[in-house]
């Protein structure tokens, strides 16, 4: 029976470009429904030296997709001609794979984010489970499109420095953590630049729950619970 | 096929709860409006660049127009994934045609090919609303308008997509086209000068952007004449 629903899922994946690269970031939770089932699942993986892939949605489907990409990378390695898939090609490939599976009514239940840096240009693209795809200077999947994207639209510039971009990303992650109940305070951030791919060790962010409105959320909503 | 269709959440009868989980549909409406106006020796094609889903804007800059050759373009609103696939299919068919015939495909031929391509998927349609526009063999402006499964006709001007209810009446009013029902058949080509036609299209988009949440951000405008395709860009409100 092909028409399914997701079991173990990851929440938002965020991505922004900056002056000389791209950043991807997300938490490391694999949730089983609303159970925090896997707390150290790395949802951002390296594809090759110029490209990373981040996933939200069904995590087993993500592992299957990574296997497809590893087979392609292995082929590139065996050819031994120095060529490898460019970020735009990885993105285009994934768009076709996901669209093809939706045509079979057997979707891969993911929203993917491809980040890369090639020929001096940052690349940032996303594709959803029915093949809907686009590239932009900043993007976010799932809840992130509601929570983080407005912040990005306000503060992002394509010529940001790495420090500014990192700071913006941490702010977005924090907002997502405050408002998305299916998230945890354990994040990873990936950077792709001319120096190659680096994916950070998991880290936590300083949070503050002592805001007045957190203590009494109904203060400005008389008659609410 | 019917068994594979997505199951929609239903209202539970009193006393029994239905287990709810995410449902799935192979279709999504990413919005957008496309407009084309044919003149005696030109064709103006325009498409908004906003891409949405539900109440969210996904990106503000996604082109909906495929430029096949200097005499023929295709503009599509609807679902982005189907639109991209349709454009890839038509592009590849056009490349093959050029290898076989050593010339670019004429606009009326491409119009028929688009119809066939849409009807080929009659029972799992591309969720796209298309215009094929350009210059015909005599150099006159040509616009073809379609439904999602390939029914099409040649018109003097056309629009498709989310803003069509707002734009079509304006074009009907301003271009004073003869009724297609009138006998004897009358000339339906716009005799407007090119500049006025471009202004009309721009005005229509600005108006549609006021009320339609799926039309906004930018408008990509192609002006097709016998010499070249000129591109223009109009900024709309980003709200």
Image (tube, rainbow, N blue to C red):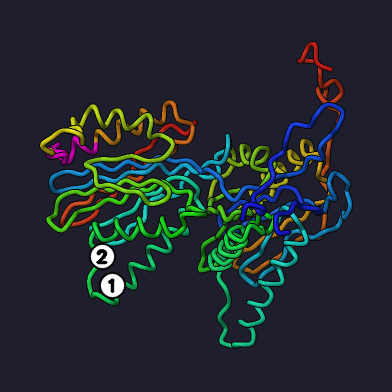
Q: Determine whether, in the image, residue B206 is placed left or right of residue B228.
A: right
Q: Are marks 1 and 2 in contact (CB under 8 Å)?
A: yes
Part of the protein shown in magenta: B186-198
Task: Looking at the image, tell me whether mark 1 or mark 2 is earlier in sequence order.
Answer: 1
* Residue A94 placement: quadrant: bottom right
Placement of A24 over or under B7, stated as above or below: below
> Visible in this render: residue B229?
yes
Q: Is residue A35 left or right of residue B97?
A: right
Q: Secondary structure at mark 2?
A: loop
Q: Is A23 above or below relative to A215?
A: below
Question: Residue B191 lies in magenta, yes or no?
Answer: yes
Q: Residues within 10 Å of mark 1 (few under 14, many from 20)?
A: few
Residue B122 is covered by the magenta coloring = no
**For the residues marked 1 and 2, what is the alpha-carbon distance in whole angstroms?**
7 Å
- Please report the residue visible at 62 percent of the width from the left and 41 percent of the height from the top: A149
Q: Nearer the viewer, residue B97 or A168?
A: B97
Q: Which residue is mark 1?
A: B98
Label 2 is found on which chain of the structure? B
| Residue A219: image location, x then y, percent | 81, 15
Vertical order, A190 against A46 (above or below): above
The secondary structure type at the circle numbered 1 is: helix
Q: Main secondary structure of the magenta part?
A: loop
Q: Residue at x 26, y 61 (%)?
A: B109
- Give residue A71's position: percent from left, percent from top: 67, 77
Q: Quadrant of residue A178?
A: top right
Left or right of A161? Residue A181 is: right
Which residue has dot 2 on it?
Answer: B105
Residue at 60 percent across and 88 percent down: it is A80
**Residue B233 locus on image (x, y percent):** 33, 43
Q: Nearer the viewer, residue A86 or B149?
A: B149
């Amino acid at each position: 029976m092909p028409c399914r629903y997701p079991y173990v899922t990851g929440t938002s994946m965020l991505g922004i470009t900056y002056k000389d690269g791209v950043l991807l970031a997300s938490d490391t939770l694999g949730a089983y429904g609303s159970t925090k089932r896997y707390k150290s699942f790395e949802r951002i993986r390296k594809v090759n030296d110029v490209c990373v892939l981040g996933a939200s949605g069904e995590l087993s489907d993500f592992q299957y997709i990574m296997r497809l990409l590893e087979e392609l990378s292995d082929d590139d390695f065996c050819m031994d001609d120095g060529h490898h898939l460019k970020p735009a090609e990885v993105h285009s490939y994934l768009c076709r794979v996901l669209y093809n599976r939706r045509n079979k009514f057997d979707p891969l239940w993911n929203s993917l984010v491809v980040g890369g840096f090639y020929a001096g240009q940052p690349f940032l693209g996303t594709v959803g489970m029915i093949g809907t795809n686009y590239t932009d200077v900043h993007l976010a999947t799932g809840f992130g499109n509601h929570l983080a994207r407005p912040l990005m639209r306000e503060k992002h510039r394509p010529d940001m420095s790495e420090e500014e971009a990192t700071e913006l990303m941490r702010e977005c992650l924090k907002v997502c953590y405050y408002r998305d109940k299916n998230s945890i305070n354990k994040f990873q951030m990936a950077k792709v630049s001319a120096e190659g791919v680096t994916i950070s060790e998991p880290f936590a962010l300083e949070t503050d729950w002592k805001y007045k409105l957190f203590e009494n959320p109904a203060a400005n909503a008389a008659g609410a619970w | 096929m019917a068994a594979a269709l997505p199951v929609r959440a239903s209202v539970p009868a009193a006393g029994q709860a239905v287990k709810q989980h995410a449902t799935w549909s192979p279709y999504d409406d990413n919005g957008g409006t496309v407009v084309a106006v044919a003149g005696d020796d030109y064709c103006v094609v325009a498409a908004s660049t906003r891409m949405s889903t539900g109440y969210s804007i996904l990106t503000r800059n996604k082109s909906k127009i495929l430029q096949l050759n200097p005499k023929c373009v295709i503009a599509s609103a609807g679902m982005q994934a189907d639109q991209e696939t349709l454009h890839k299919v038509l592009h590849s068919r056009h490349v093959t045609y050029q290898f076989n015939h050593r010339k670019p495909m004429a606009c009326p031929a491409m119009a028929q090919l688009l119809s066939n391509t849409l009807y080929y998927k009659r029972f799992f349609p591309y969720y796209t609303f298309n215009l094929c526009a350009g210059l015909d063999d005599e150099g006159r402006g040509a616009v073809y308008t379609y439904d999602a499964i390939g029914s099409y006709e040649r018109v003097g001007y056309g629009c498709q997509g989310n803003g069509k209810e707002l734009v079509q009446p304006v074009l009907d009013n301003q271009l004073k086209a003869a009724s297609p029902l009138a006998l004897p058949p009358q000339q339906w080509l716009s005799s407007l000068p090119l500049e006025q036609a471009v202004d009309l299209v721009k005005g229509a988009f600005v108006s549609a952007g006021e009320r339609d949440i799926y039309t906004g951000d930018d408008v990509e405008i192609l002006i097709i004449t016998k010499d070249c395709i000129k591109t223009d860009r109009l900024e709309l409100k980003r709200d």
